Image: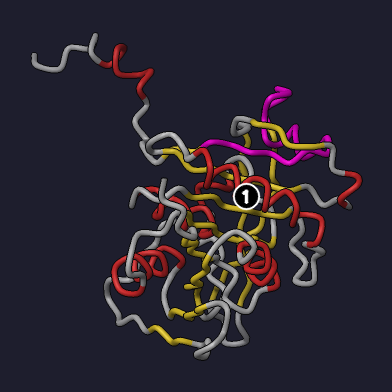
Amino acid sequence: MDKKTPLILITNDDGISAPGIRTLISVMTQLGDVVVVAPDKPQSAMGHAITINSTLYLNKISKNGDAVTEYSCSGTPVDCVKLAVNEILKRKPDLCVSGINHGSNSSINVIYSGTMSAAMEAGIEGIPAIGFSLSDYNWDADFEPTKPFIKQIAAQVLEQGLPDGVLLNVNFPKLKQDEIKGIKIARQAKAMWQERFDKRQTPHGKDYYWLTGEFVNQDHGQDTDEWALANGYISVVPVQFDLTAHHAIQQLNTWNWNE
């Protein structure tokens, strides 16, 4: 059996200097050889955006002899993964981890998340991938309690692999380590943002808008990521990038399409 050291790609959406990614780097170096490619500035809520109408820049910020090779990228989180796979890495990584995001990516937030889109891009490339998020938006959030669990989850994925087309969305509650009850494999809760726009005017009379809103959980099931987080558990949701609504195919085939 090949005993080569795992190659781990790390990225995020909060930017390469964010405390969350620095924590993730410190954990992943215990499991393998690490290469970091992350945005040079915050790119939260970018979803699966890619850069096609402007140039992309990579800046190697690590020095020869550093334990970890790091690059900052002018593009989106997905751009970072694409550049890493196609331009930087000499072989396909054994694992891609994204995060640790400053703020939850549970439920519907997975759709908007740059953190999860970076992981999803890796999954599309056939790389086992995990997105990690902590339910604390504070820049100075305490990531220490997440470390042993991140190492455990990443080690399991390296050892076991993931089903084809599947990646993991992992969210941590904002708790001390001894307050975390454990890990729950969960489904994505049915929840949404009830949004509104705060309309204002510039001193010159031009309208502008701030997006605001309230997160509403419509799902009372005890098998969801929202329930897990609210009850002191780490939620692990298997996510797929095949968006086909397979359950609707049979019904749609009963319609009269060719009349």
Please give the name of the residue rendered at 57% of the width and 76% of the height, measured from the top-left corner.
16
Could one spot residue 40 in this view of the protein?
yes
Residue ID for mark 1:
105
Please, is residue 249 above or below residue 234 in the view? above
Where does the C terminus fall, quadrant-wise? top left
Question: In which quarter of the view is residue 197 placed?
Answer: bottom right
**Segment colored magenta:** 218-238
Residue 207 coordinates in the image, percent (x, y): 55, 73
Please give the name of the residue rendered at 35% of the width and 59% of the height, measured from the top-left corner.
92
Please, is residue 33 above or below residue 247 in the view? below
Please give the name of the residue rendered at 48% of the width and 81% of the height, measured from the top-left corner.
72
Please, is residue 184 above or below residue 234 in the view? above
Left or right: 249, with 115 as reference point: left
Question: What is the residue that sits farthest to the top in this orientation?
Answer: 254
Determine if the magenta segment contains residue 105: no
Taking depth in this image into account, of 245 and 208 the one nearest to the observer is 245
Question: In which quarter of the view is residue 25 placed?
Answer: bottom right
Residue 227 coordinates in the image, percent (x, y): 75, 32
Please, is residue 236 above or below residue 2 in the view? above
Q: What element carries label 1?
A: loop
Taking depth in this image into account, of 259 and 76 the one nearest to the observer is 76
Residue 152 coordinates in the image, percent (x, y): 68, 47
> What's the residue type where badge 1 is placed?
Asn
Question: In which quarter of the view is residue 163 placed?
Answer: top left
